[in-house]
Image (cartoon, rainbow, N blue to C red):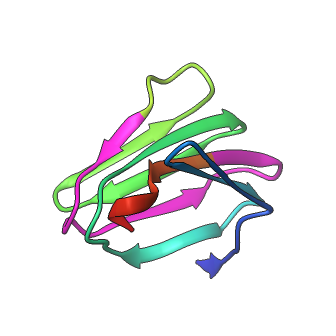
Amino acid sequence: MRLIDPIHRVTYDGAALYIFHANKGEGLPRHQHVYAHLTICHAGSCVIRKEGIEKVITKNTTPINLKEFEWHEIEALEDGTVFANVFAVDKA
């Protein structure tokens, strides 16, 4: 998977919102954080993988909570995928 950077990084009132535009095979390879974050798919589809779980999400999927200290990865399954990560700034 090819690593991508956020196209927008917004901080507002204690929350950070990172928006990613990805094509098939792009995303965030396996990693973990000391903080939890919420992942939302706005267009296209992506797969979230974490220990023992693989879930495909689309714009119709309830946002996924990824826990702190838990490895995960997010990969776009089609061109034009847009997803966002939201987390508390003071925890990052």
| Percent position of residue 50, x then y | 27, 59
Which quadrant holds the C terminus? Answer: bottom left
Q: Residue at x 50, y 36 (%)?
A: 57
Residue nearest the observer in this picture, 13 or 74: 13
Using the image, determine if residue 77 lies above or below residue 43. Answer: below
Residue 86 percent coordinates (x, y): 50, 47
Q: Which residues are magenta?
A: 64-83
Q: Is residue 69 magenta?
A: yes
Count how many numbered circles sit on residues in the image.
0
Left or right: where 63 falls relative to 81: left
Looking at this view, name the residue that lies furthest to the top.
60
User: Whole-percent x and y of residue 63?
Assistant: 44, 31
Q: Image quarter for residue 75? A: bottom right
Whether residue 78 sits left or right of residue 48 in the image: it is: right
Residue found at x 63% / y 79%: 3
Residue furthest toward the front?
13
Q: Is residue 41 left or right of residue 69?
A: right
Residue 26 position within the rendered picture, expressed as x and y whole percent measured from the top left: 67, 69
Which residue is rendered at x = 72% and y = 38% of the image? Answer: 44
Nearest the eye: 65 or 23: 65
15 left or right of 76 in image: left
Q: Is residue 89 above or below residue 46?
A: below
The part of the image, by quadrant, that contains residue 52 is bottom left
The N terminus is located in which quarter?
bottom right
Magenta-colored stretch includes residue 68: yes
